[in-house]
Image (spheres, grey):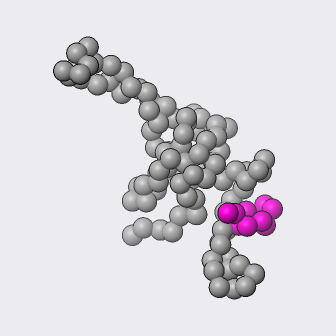
Amino acid sequence: MQTKLKLKSGDTVVVISGNHKGASGAIKSINRETNRVVVEGVNMVKRHTKPSPQQPEGKIIEKEAPLHISNVKLKVGDVVTRVGRKLNESGDKLVRYAKKTAEEIK
């Protein structure tokens, strides 16, 4: 069963644990089945490619590997915060908000 995630693609996040603690970047993609996110420029790994007619010698590609969603927190301005969901002022739409500053996230 998939859970409702509070982060979206394009959000700026900070890594809060692991080898890349303190690094930040925008979310490129989210895998809802495994609860993992790919963050721009974070958790870079090297992958070797086989030789092919286009690349006769093969090559080494550096790309981002996914992180578990529990290892990242949303960054709003200079504040790193958790994300909550509540009804907006008119009471007709569910919106995300920063728990530390209580401001609405666009």
Q: Quadrant of residue 60?
A: top left
* Residue 13 drawn at (x, y percent): 63, 48
Whether residue 68 appears in this view of the structure is no
Q: Residue at x 68, y 80 (%)?
A: 87
Q: Quadrant of residue 86?
A: bottom right
**Foreground: 105 or 6?**
105
In the image, farthest residue toward the left: 53
Looking at the rendering, the stretch of residues picked out in magenta corresponds to 97-106
Please name the predominant secondary structure of the magenta segment in the image. loop
Q: Residue at x 59, y 35 (%)?
A: 20
Q: Looking at the figure, which quarter contains the C terminus?
A: bottom right
* Residue 53 drawn at (x, y percent): 18, 21
Whether residue 24 appears in this view of the structure is yes
* Residue 84 drawn at (x, y percent): 67, 68
In the image, farthest residue toward the top: 57
Q: Residue at x 42, y 67 (%)?
A: 2
**Foreground: 53 or 11?**
53
Q: Is residue 54 above or below residue 106?
A: above
* Residue 1 drawn at (x, y percent): 39, 70
